[in-house]
Amino acid sequence: MFSRRTEWGLAPNRFTEAVLAAQNAGQEFLDLTISNPTRTGLFYDRAAVLDALRNEKALDYDPQPKGLLSAREAVASYYLHRGERVGAEHVVLTTSTSEGYSYVFRLLADLGAEVLVPKPSYPLFDFLADLQDVKLIPYPLIYDHRWQIDLHSVEQAVSARTAAIVLVHPNNPTGSYVSSQERARLNQLCAEHGISLIVDEVFLDYAHDGSAPRSFVDNAEALTFTLSGLSKISALPQMKLAWIAVTGPQELVREAMARLEVIADTYLSVNAPVQLAAPALLDQRKSIQTQLMSRLRANLCELDRQLSSNPAHSRLDVEGGWYAALRVPATQSDEDLAITLLRECAVLGHPGHFYDFPSDGHLVLSLITERQIFREGISRILSFLKA
């Protein structure tokens, strides 16, 4: 009765069962996995956000497949403010980056085509690929004092069936940006084999050193689909506005845009009020990102401070994004460790295998956690591990 593409194992894993049991028992715990910025004590300009949604033009239905021009111009302005250029005519609006992936997979990949994806990385890729009948081929990120793409493995993984290479810039959860050298080699590889880049940049603005890492939105050497949105840029995941920016060789961009427009026209998924509010909602990033950067740095400093007196434990280098990976002695599986910490210390952290870390001994922690919760949570984790 049901399609094979949705034959997932839907039974909860042991970690999920442990979390649900704690919640059902009314247990209070410190959540160091939080990813929803609207519940982390940030200050939002409520009037500006809500007033932006109050627009009489929303009463008129003006179906534009790529999205309203005013919203696409707001996206182009965001990049221009960063010192990068993309024309509004090369932007397609979606409700989320997940939907953006779906559009691009449909555009590039026939049944059984392969898409290369990084590991470790966010586990959502598996579901998106299954729904679009795409086969994922992992390529490793390797760690040697810092994270880097194993370019040799990427080269070995490319085949006649390869449709695209996915980059996450910076990666989630490793927080590593694609270097200029990696970018040059990947562009060369795409040109040699006639494949595209799909670049997820939702955490682009959150470089911990305060720099402004270069976006792929100006990438001209290979057909490139850059995905981002309000969810992380302005910490407004509930507003459901994201985009695909298409750049690269002109002929390929022209063909890609024509086909993407048909795909977008088939769904017309983005609602009018949020499109009309896009300029104001994107403008909220100026306040929100300042708050988030302050918290990210403070929590990372706190983590380092507590680790300084615990030499058996360390964290992996992180350049940007909202997460940090804590490295601990692998005396048990990451899942067992996370369950034990929940039960014994009332602290919730993500086991590294959720993100396909290649070995046990990793916990992934959210740096956007409120500072006092993060401080106490790290203290409990390290005290338990030391004991």
Image: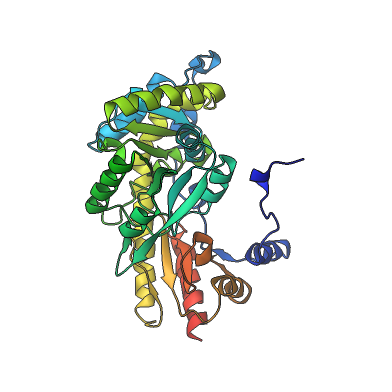
Residue 351 makes an appearance in the image = no
Q: Nearer the viewer, residue 48 or 289?
A: 289
Q: Where is residue 134 in the image (x, y as percent from the top left)?
A: 53, 43
Q: Residue furthest front?
A: 160
Residue at 45% x, 22% y: name it: 261
Question: In the image, is 282 to the left or to the right of 81?
Answer: right
Where the N terminus falls, by quadrant? top right
Numbered marks: total: 0
Q: Residue furthest right?
A: 1
Q: Which of 43 and 329 is in front in this view?
A: 329
- How was this image coloured? rainbow
Q: Where is residue 158 in the image (x, y as percent from the top left)?
A: 38, 50
Q: Residue furthest bottom?
A: 387
Does 343 sit above or below residue 39?
A: below
Question: In the image, is 70 to the left or to the right of 219?
Answer: right
Residue 141 makes an appearance in the image = yes
Question: In the image, is 303 to the left or to the right of 364?
Answer: left
Does 375 sit above or below residue 206?
A: below
Residue at 49% x, 79% y: name it: 330
Residue at 49% x, 22% y: name it: 262
Question: In the image, is 102 to the left or to the right of 216?
Answer: right
Q: Where is residue 130 in the image (x, y as percent from the top left)?
A: 58, 45
Q: Where is residue 313 in the image (x, y as percent from the top left)?
A: 41, 78
Q: Nearer the viewer, residue 141 or 122?
A: 141
Q: Nearer the viewer, residue 307 or 194?
A: 194
Does 255 sit above or below residue 40?
A: above
